[in-house]
Image (cartoon, grey):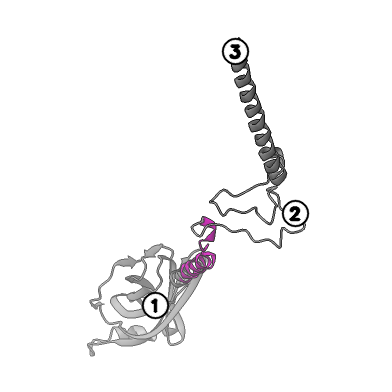
Amino acid sequence: MGKSQSNLAKHKDKSQDALVDSDEYRDIQTEEDEKNGDVSQFPYVEFTGRDSVTCPTCQGTGRIPRGQENQLVALIPYSDQRLRPSRTKLYVTISVALCLLLCGLAVFFLFPRSIDVSYVGVKTVYVSYDQDRRIVFLNITNTMNITNNNYYAISVTNITAQVQFSKTVIGKAKFNNSTVIMPLDEQHIDYTVPTTIADDMSYMFDYCTLQTIKVHNIVVMMQVTVTTSYFGHAEQVSQEMYQYVDCGGNTTSLHGHVQVYQ
């Protein structure tokens, strides 16, 4: 009987101690709740250390107030890709320089340059006579040099030549053979003009067949017009030259040539 009362007294003491501990815990929890507020409404805190503070801009909501989008400054790490210079000016400058360089090269290489035509001289003269009609026939082969100063090929479309003696045209010829001259190259071209000395100039027959003199030179004027084309553009270059021609016999002068027009 005495033991039962003793155990009951001990059980009451433990219960009272537990109630006291529970009341103390509730008091401590109540103080913490009053201090910190409801857990469901706990504000946003940057957990980077003990000294962390609530963001003063958004007050823990994570949202920026309206009307302050253009007033607030965002802090980003120094190593962020957006902080690196975009080098837009450098790229634009390089692009413009390359465009100017390409345009300059195109103008330099495609700008049309002059085509030089130089008359070299008479290469050969073949003489024949018609004694009955007192006519002198001369087949005069001339040599000229055409120089292409361009950085692209040109085409010689035709050559027109004529020979005058004493202000009278005694021979004409036109050649439509096409010749291509490569860039920065030159080409020697031979062409033959058949001429006839007759009618009002039949007195030249006596001079050309006179046996007492060895050289029967006459002065003739050579005219030649060269038509060239490139990129659909046609250009004409003319040359005039006075030359001595021996009408008393066949003569030959050595000149290098590439092509002969007859």
Q: Amino acid at mark 3?
A: Gly
What residue would you read off at disc 3? 2
Apparent side of residue 186 relative to residue 81 in the rendered image (left or right): left
**Residue 138 seen in render:** no
Q: Pick whichever, 194 or 158, lies toward us.
A: 158
Marks 3 and 1 sit apart, C-alpha to C-alpha, by 149 Å
Judged from the image, the secondary structure of the residue bearing numbered disc 3 is helix
What residue would you read off at disc 1? 117
- At 51% from the left edge and 56% from the top edge, which residue is drawn? 81
Reading the chain from its start, which is encountered first: label 3 or label 1? 3
The disc at residue 261 is none
Q: Nearer the viewer, mark 3 or mark 1?
A: 3
Q: Amino acid at mark 2?
A: Pro
Vertical side of 245 occupied by 184: above or below: above
Marks 1 and 2 sit apart, C-alpha to C-alpha, by 84 Å
The quadrant where residue 128 appears: bottom left
The quadrant where residue 226 appears: bottom left
The disc at residue 65 is 2
Q: Amino acid at mark 1?
A: Val
Q: What range is drawn magenta here?
A: 81-104
Vertical side of 7 occupied by 56: above or below: below
Q: Is residue 173 magenta?
A: no
Q: Position of residue 201 (x, y in %)?
A: 42, 84
Q: Position of residue 206 (x, y in %)?
A: 33, 85
Query: Can you name the residue that lies furthest to the front here?
Result: 2
The quadrant where residue 241 appears: bottom left
